[in-house]
Amino acid sequence: MKLYFFDTSALVKHYHPEIGHKVVQTLFAQSDAKIVISTLTIVEMHSAMYKKVRTGELKLSEAKSVLGFMSQEIVSGKLNVTHLEIEHYRDAASLLSKYAPKHFLRTLDALQLAVALSLHRRNPLEAFVTADEDLAKVAETEGLPVLNPAESETQGTFDTEGR
């Protein structure tokens, strides 16, 4: 089983056709893939979809439809949700102390990364999937295999076998 942890910047591409969408769809189509998100991703997806409404990229009805579909994928088990624990907050604070003085690492990104690192310690990830270049750099420095779907699609570095 290939374990993929998606942050919000990458998960948006599953529901909205933008650069990286094809790569994300390929990952979701793999029969041996387990897609994991955090509870934080659910909240961030609401924010991301309603931002697309404000900017005119989506109609309100489309955003609500996307969020409904995401909920269905959670219920069906297509998306596996891991809950934030107190250790994730401590680890995120440590990551911020370590990287934020020199890297652009935001609070919620540090939490996402802390969850991914925790999962990776228990069961190695095939990839931490993010379209956030700053977050990807920190994740790589922490030893996570990273897949940026937007970068992979534009550079042609992704094949349909998954990496």
Image (cartoon, rainbow, N blue to C red):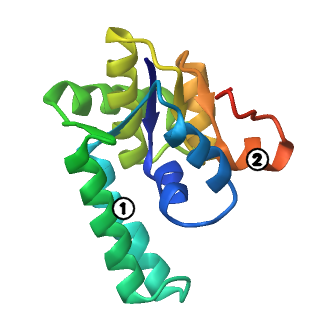
Q: How far from the left and from the top, in percent, is residue 41?
A: 33, 50
Within-10-Å neighbours for mark 2: few <14, some 14–19, many 20+: some
The amino acid on which the numbered mark 2 sits, given as a three-letter code, is Glu
Q: Is residue 136 above or below residue 71?
A: above
Residue placed under numbered mark 2 in the picture: 153
Q: Residue drawn at (58%, 46%), measured in percent from left and top?
A: 24
Element type where label 1 sits in the image: helix
Q: How far from the left and from the top, in percent, is residue 99?
A: 51, 31
Q: CA distance from mark 2 to mark 1?
A: 22 Å
In the picture provided, is 22 more to the left or to the right than 100? right
Q: Are marks 2 and 1 in contact (CB under 8 Å)?
A: no
Q: How far from the left and from the top, in percent, is residue 79?
A: 32, 43
Q: Residue drawn at (28%, 68%), measured in percent from left and top?
A: 68
Residue placed under numbered mark 1 in the picture: 45
In the picture provided, is 155 more to the left or to the right than 66? right
In the picture provided, is 101 more to the left or to the right than 48? right
The amino acid on which the numbered mark 1 sits, given as a three-letter code, is Met
Q: How far from the left and from the top, in percent, is residue 124?
A: 44, 12
In the picture provided, is 50 more to the left or to the right than 11? left
Which comes sooner in the sequence, label 2 or label 1?
A: 1
